[in-house]
């Protein structure tokens, strides 16, 4: 699952994930949409932007997804300051990738996730 409110970045993420062999089951651009779609599709993992549309950020969505459904996130964001990272520990993130992301970083994060299964 991809949670990203910039359409071009979401498309790039989707193409890169599929090139790496992952199946993208859905995309969301806000926290409420992410939670609703995650309940419906039950993805194994989420790539989560932090600064997304709406009154909630990606960290709060990731925490809810982990606490409610056990779904972990790979944060893909330009916002990785220490305070944000500390708050995000409640989501048990797989990892952090800075934007602009690279295929190598995404592949490494997916391998990290696979190793925790």
Image (tube, grey):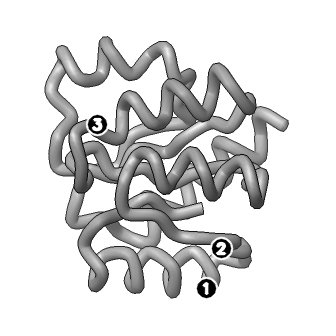
Q: Tell me the number on the disc at residue 82.
A: none
| Crowding at mark 1 (Cα within 10 Å: few <14, some 14-19, many 20+) | few
Query: What quarter of the picture does the N terminus occupy?
Result: bottom right
Q: Which residue lies under the disc numbered 3?
A: 56
Separation (CA) of disc 3 from disc 2: 23 Å
Q: In this view, does 18 lie to the left or right of 108?
A: right
Q: Sequence-wise, which precedes: disc 3 or disc 2?
A: 2
Q: Which residue lies under the disc numbered 2?
A: 24
Q: Residue at 28% across / 36% down in the picture? A: 56
Q: Sequence-wise, which precedes: disc 2 or disc 1?
A: 1
Q: Which of marks 3 and 2 is in front?
A: 3
| Crowding at mark 2 (Cα within 10 Å: few <14, some 14-19, many 20+) | some
Q: Residue at 52% across / 30% down in the picture? A: 93
Q: In this view, does 72 lie to the left or right of 41?
A: left
Separation (CA) of disc 3 from disc 1: 30 Å
Q: Quadrant of residue 6?
A: bottom left
Q: Quadrant of residue 116?
A: top right
Q: Which residue lies under the disc numbered 1?
A: 19
Q: Residue at 31% across / 13% down in the picture? A: 86
Q: Nearer the viewer, mark 2 or mark 1?
A: 2
């Amino acid at each position: 699952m991809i949670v990203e409110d910039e359409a071009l970045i979401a498309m790039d993420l989707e193409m890169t994930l599929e090139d790496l062999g992952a199946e993208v089951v859905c995309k969301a651009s806000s926290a409420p949409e992410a939670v609703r779609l995650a309940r419906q599709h039950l993805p194994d993992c989420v790539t989560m932007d932090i600064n997304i549309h709406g009154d909630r950020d990606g960290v709060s969505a990731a925490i809810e997804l982990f606490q409610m459904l056990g779904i972990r996130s790979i944060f893909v964001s330009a916002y990785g300051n220490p305070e944000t990272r500390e708050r995000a520990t409640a989501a048990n993130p797989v990892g952090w990738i800075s934007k602009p992301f690279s295929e190598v970083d995404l592949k490494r994060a997916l391998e990290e996730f696979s190793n925790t299964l």
